[in-house]
Amino acid sequence: MKLTSKIFATALLALGTFSASAQLMQKKEIYTRADTLRGMLTPLRTCYDINYYHLDVKFDIDKKYISGSNLFKFTATQNFTKLQFDLYANLKVEKVEYQGKELPFTREAAAVFVTFPKAIIKGSKDEFTVYYSGNPTVAKRAPWDGGVVFTTDSLGKPYVATACQGAGASIWWPTKDHQADEVDSALISISVPKGLKDVSNGRLRKVTELADGYTRFDWFVANPINNYDIAANIADYTHMEDSYDGEQGKLTLDYWVLPYHQELAKKQFDRDVKRMLKSFEYWFGPYPWYKDGYKLVETPHLGMEHQSAVAYGNKYRNGYLGRDLSGTGRGLTWDFIIVHESGHEWFGNNITSKDIADMWIHESFTNYSESLFIESYYGKTAGLEYVQGTRKNIQNDIPVIGPYNVNKEGSGDMYYKGGNMLALIRTLINNDEKWRAILRGLNKTFYHQTVTTAQIENYISKEAGMNLAPVFDQYLRHKDLPILDLKFENGKVYAKWTTDVKNFNIPIKLRKKGGEFYFVKLNNEFAPVGLPGLTKENLEVDTLEYCVKVNGL
């Protein structure tokens, strides 16, 4: 949940997203150099490919202060003497060390520019370490704003968590802060006051009692990971273990929760985690992180798809904090955060958009995963009803795809409009096995990769065997839904699409009331509907599977 990418376009979440949405809705947004430095892949970023991080951070919770270092191991993609990494300006770069010596650096906004004493040669592997300290941005309404949450549990013990999607990982640690380059593996060492535990991504390698009254927890991530997914979660946790027999063998399940919530957690997690995994492995393919395991970590914020360490703050309620975002009742039989955030393990973490402007790849598919979960256990109609119910949250404010190279998302409609678009594409393909093969194929073809919208669109169209470009264009690149225009003249029914996209020629499903639905081919010009006996009184449009506006009925 993300100025995080989880900008829900719904009244339930309006308070958390209103200011960001208001900015996005301006007719013309002015982008700064800082936006470009953060959002663009300049030669100072593309000159090196990140291979490994060792993030080593100490949390002084009383002072809300952090200090530590990050080791950058990289491969040079070209000859260079200068590169950029990122760290928010309120955090101090103490020094940048290379081969035992300090490197000169300059800062501009959140960008840090480092100059090497001689050229780094293309293809060579090298490393440098950044030492830093300071008071990180305190998140006030995580996960909708980024930073570190400093609070206490109900017993008054420290309760700390990071959440930084959208804002960027550089809000609390030095990194190459761009989604296009995922580190191949990482060691995350978090030191916390004695008596507390840190839970981060991957697997716990070592716990070390330090001489200064702190305890260091070393977590190793064996797979590529988004830097915004790397997390610290600090509390007086208790640990529960389980396992799941999945498509690639035994998957470890680890739950880290506050001790007094252990029974609640066991009941909620036992019910929903395994059935979520069964559903999503069926639809999307194997869980992508068997080497790193699956974890749920209780957090003081609502939730976030932190890879292999999903943040959970839904307070052990069904739905979204006890509410059904679809308004149909279909969302009240399962825990929204477990299902939605875990869905991101496939779409968002396994398949990651290169640019935050393409965050629909994360959110549309994961929104749609909720309906597939419902379908797995309550039937296809139930899943479609859930998708249909979410349409009330569509704003049609701005396009779903945002502006590129400035670290800006598009509309929060990436959730509900995007999920409905995918349900529509499934209807157009009209072959559920092919649709399932496409979803699984996406996760296999783009396994552990960063991608563009074009790659996803082209793959789906190719595998579907049809040109879906008009659908993607209308739903993602324009703010309005397609309009089905109907008119009735001289005993005949005429229909056409009114769209921003030319040659919008998808078929619509129509029927005579009580009868069977038929696909009727349409384009942007009125044409007679070739179904006998239709009148204004008995014509029905399939609005269960089609997220469109209808004029004329």
Image (cartoon, rainbow, N blue to C red):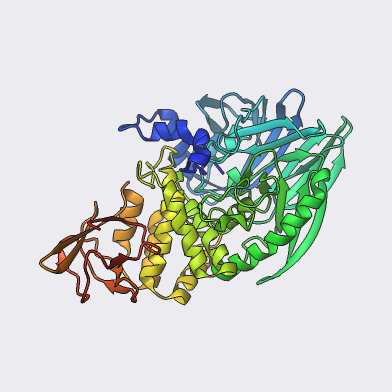
Residue at 59% x, 23% y is: 90
Above or below, 375 relative to 259: below
Which residue extends farthest left? 490
Q: Which corner quadrant of the image does residue 192 belong to?
A: top right
Q: Nearer the viewer, residue 138 or 370?
A: 370
- Which quarter of the figure is the N terminus placed in? top right
Where does the image place residue 425, in percent across and percent down from the top left? 38, 65
Is residue 139 shown above or below 184? above
Q: Quadrant of residue 547?
A: bottom left
Against 283, is 415 above or below? Answer: above
Where's residue 252, x and y in %? 75, 62
Residue 307 percent location from the top left of the image: 63, 52
Residue closer to the observer: 293 or 174: 293
Residue sticking out furthest to the front: 537
Give above or below for 541 relative to 77: below
Which residue: 24% across, 61% down? Answer: 504
Q: Residue at x 51, y 56 (%)?
A: 328
Q: Is residue 391 left or right of residue 94?
A: left
Residue 187 in sight in this render: yes
The mark total stands at 0
Q: Is residue 452 visible?
A: no
Q: Position of residue 222 (x, y in %)?
A: 68, 56
User: Quadrant where the C terminus lies?
Assistant: bottom left
Q: Quadrant of residue 379?
A: bottom right
